Amino acid sequence: MVGYIVRRLLAAIPLVLGVATIVFFVVNLAPGDPASIYSAPGVSPQAVEQMRQNMGLDRPIHERYVRWMGAMLQGDFGISFSRNQPVRDVIAQILPNTLILSASALLLAFGAGILIGVVQAVRQNTFTDGALSVGTLFFYSMPSFWLALMLILIFSLYARNVWGWPLWLPASGMVSVDHNAMGPWEQVLDRLRHLVLPSASLALVLAAGVARYMRGSMLEVIRQDYIRTARAKGLPERTVILKHAVRNALIPVVTLLGLYLPVLFSGTVVIETVFAWPGMGKLMVDSIFQRDYPVVMAGAFVFAVMVVVGNLVADLLYAAVDPRIRYE
Amino acid sequence: MALLEVKELRTWFEGEAGTVRAVDGVSFSVGEGEVVGLVGGSGCGKTVTALSVLGLVPQPPGRIQAGSSIRLGDLELVGASPRELRAVRGRRVGMIFQEPMSSLNPVYTVGEQIGESLRLHRGVGRREARRLCVGLLEEVGIPEPERRRRQYPHELSGGMQQRVMIAMALAAEPELLIADEPTTALDVTTQAQILALLARLRESRGMALLLITHDLAVVAETCHRVLVMHRGRIVEADSVEAVFHRPRHPHTRSLLDSLSPLKGETGQGEADLEGGTGDGTPVGSDGSGS
């Protein structure tokens, strides 16, 4: 098991380095000049040129590549052009925010999706099944940024200003302006309130996919002989479904986890921008606009590592739900 | 008094192509401690009959028709509430199936699956269930029960899996064990062992056995009485000797001939057996399976 994990991680090294290389060339060959952010009225062209030299941008691209890769392998991602602090510190500060958002979105997506799928399968071809099918298809076919805007419109804007609900949800940032003045429990509540809309925007679309998958998987499992055995034992239907069917139906759904991670991370880029969530996605977008090459490259690298690790976790979970799978 | 009394059982399946009368007016009884063989070709309604007894026919599309009666002792099972049926399933009537591999849940250990029955029907705790489980595994002839208990079904051979199924069915000490083609999926040597085990357990526990099979050889070795089923009906019911020596129904004769293809005196071969089991009509030959 440990040997398997180590081998998988070693095998991922060329993949991650390949991703880093591609990102390096895409970013560096793209039009735009990072030093241009310094060009302003009153700044001489010589000074801008001096900045360009300081950033090492006057060097040929292959030389920059070798230097960047060499430094990165030692854990040095360079200095952010726009923030003037080490990229590593910038990411260390911001990565947890994205992890919180992604993890809660994943939990919500799989929790809700599995629940809906099971209900649909148990009530196959009833009104409940049909209504949930239409509902999940609705969210499945919806772009998450649009869903995000609609959620803001309903739960933030209208709920607060038009309908006057006491329970409206904030539409931007991770905490309220007066967060530091709150008591400890209020602070937790404040963070949770800020988390609801962005994670729901990400999760609903994914949950719809999980639900459709889970429904199919459950219907398949319910027909199996061992379900008949469980009934023949005299187990109550609830135990038959929740204990004997669900665990088996989860096996194919777990593989979705690995498939959904890249979707989720690219989703955060959009959703964090919409909700002004200070995470990796928003950092990437801001850095691209500011031609902050080191941050963009390091960010892409971090996303690649997260996808690789996430896929490994999905494969390990696969073995956890299915005892027939053993990793040697 | 009969332990199980089935009268005019009709289990039909309604599909788009029409109604399949898988079981169409079957009556029989099984006495206490008696071994009854239910024989017939594939698709004749044997399995559906067995599933009907425990209310395990998927409905829809299946439906036990009005006028059918299945009595277990004093209890009428047709139309019984889910709660009443659950109290019978596993506890008073145990059941084992044709494919032990697919009949065991692949994601739970053998011990967990047997223990589940013990906890449910005997109301014992986890620790006591573990102890009883080891005893049951020993009783069905599984070596190293303490180790096997912790294994998953896929780690056992087909014969072992069927033994586990039997242990599970015995957990609540049922009065009747329904064995639906328990040896069909196993190789010949294992078949003989499982049959011997069933015979031994039946004797030591004094339970009744309804043995469903397409193989008359199996019936000859184990049963007191035989019911021959054909196209959803029972066409012959008699003692083993009578059925073997004086078969009355042509279908019984073709089943007997299929036993020893070398006999050949009557000139009946496989072609006749095909004709005997009769396909073409939806009744018996279609759907529902055995």
Image: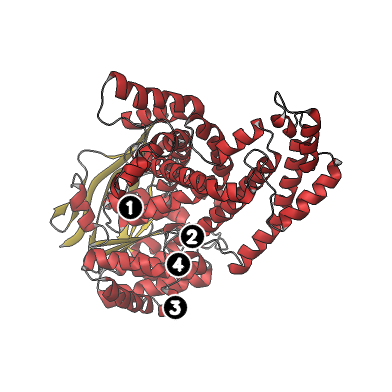
Q: Residue at x 39, y 37 (%)?
A: A194
Identified by mark 1, the residue type is Val
Whether the residues at callouts 3 and 4 have beta carbons within 8 Å, the answer is: no
Report, in whole angstroms, how far the alpha carbon at label 3 lies from the one at label 4.
Answer: 14 Å
Q: Position of residue B173 (x, y in %)?
A: 25, 69
Earlier-in-chain disc, 3 versus 4: 3
The residue identified by callout 1 is A240
Report, in whole angstroms, how far the alpha carbon at label 4 lies from the one at label 1.
Answer: 20 Å
Q: Is A54 placed above or below B153 here?
A: above
| Residue B35 visible within the image | no
Q: Is A261 placed above or below A39 here?
A: below
Q: Position of residue B129 (x, y in %)?
A: 29, 73
Q: Picture quarter containing residue B138? A: bottom left
Identified by mark 2, the residue type is Ala
Report, in whole angstroms, how far the alpha carbon at label 1 lies from the one at label 2.
Answer: 20 Å
Report, in whole angstroms, how far the alpha carbon at label 3 lies from the one at label 1.
Answer: 26 Å
Whether the residues at callouts 2 and 4 have beta carbons within 8 Å, the answer is: no
- Considering depth in this image, is B13 or A133 the residue closer to the camera? A133
For disc 1, the neighbor class at 10 Å (few under 14, some 14 to 19, many from 20) is many
Chain letter of the residue carrying label 1: A
The residue identified by callout 3 is B147
- Considering depth in this image, is B64 or B55 the residue closer to the camera? B55
The residue identified by callout 2 is A320
| Residue A20 visible within the image | yes
Identified by mark 3, the residue type is Arg
Q: Position of residue A147 (x, y in %)?
A: 45, 26
Secondary structure under tag 3 reads: helix
